[in-house]
Image: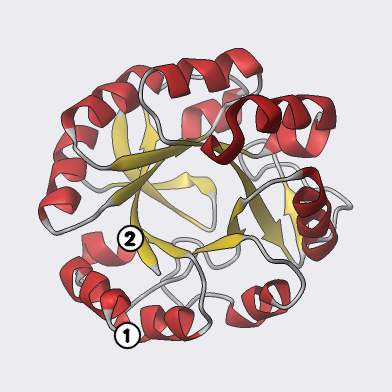
Amino acid sequence: MIILPAIDIIDGQPVRLYQGDYGQKEIVGDSVPKLADRFVAEGASYLHLVDLDGAKAGHRVNDAIIIETKKNVNVSVEVGGGIRSLEDIAHYVENGIDRVILGTIAMEDEALLKEAIARYGSHIAVGIDCKNGYVYGRGWLQGSSLYYVDFAKHLEELGVKTIIVTDISKDGTMQGPNTEMLQTLKEQVHMQIVASGGIRDIEDIRKLKEMDLYGAISGKAMVHGTLDLKEAIALCKEG
């Protein structure tokens, strides 16, 4: 399992939210590039960057600093937030981003999703952000009638290889990931599942590793010191 340190971005600054609430914003570093450098120095091989302004606005906002960050690190980077067109996807892929995460648009425009998969293959991932089992979009501000397992199964049929699964109620809380939700999903699909939301410490990483997931995203726990990135990476390399 790989560990993907998360850097969420508002107004060009690295932040963490609590349960996706834009009103509960905490600045967690001097700058996005500096925080990325820290994570890479601690051994990260993949970074997870999210343009929260873009997710809310429905278009790219912090793409310049995301691309600058990617150019300054020698590791893989995935990006989500405000990506609503093939032009947006191309913009990131052509500037070296390794994986582009589609969220709202994957729910709302299946034709675009199919075209993105056809053009960019494994460079495309889909974010499944949910609350009480149902998928949310538009920066976690708009609910839907899509049940997360049904949505994941449909994405697999369309050829999506990687999904990033977030329980919004857990995000930023450091109260532990929703392992029950993740286990249910693991039994229903055969995609690369990246767990996100709620991770607090090394025991949470151990539980996710034992589930044989592809990856785990953590941000707040590493910034607040309850999870040591080096220790997490070493654990994931065992066996």
Q: Please state the horizontal and vertical placement of residue 53, each as a whole percent of the image.
A: 49, 28
Q: Is residue 173 left or right of residue 59?
A: left
Residue where numbered disc 2 is placed = 220
What residue is at 63 percent from the left and 23 percent from the top?
58
Q: Secondary structure at mark 2?
A: helix
Q: Quadrant of residue 51?
A: top left
Q: Please state the horizontal and vertical placement of residue 83, each as a whole percent of the image.
A: 58, 26
Q: Please state the horizontal and vertical placement of residue 106, each as a whole percent of the image.
A: 73, 37
Nearer to us in this view, 129 or 97:
97
Label annotation for residue 182? none
Q: Quadrant of the C terminus?
A: bottom left
What residue is at 25 percent from the left and 22 percent from the top?
68
Instruction: Return the disc, 1 or 2, that comes first in the chain's sequence.
Output: 2
* Disc 1 packing (10 Å; few <14; some 14–19; many ≥20): few
Q: Secondary structure at mark 1?
A: loop
Q: Is residue 94 left or right of residue 86?
A: left
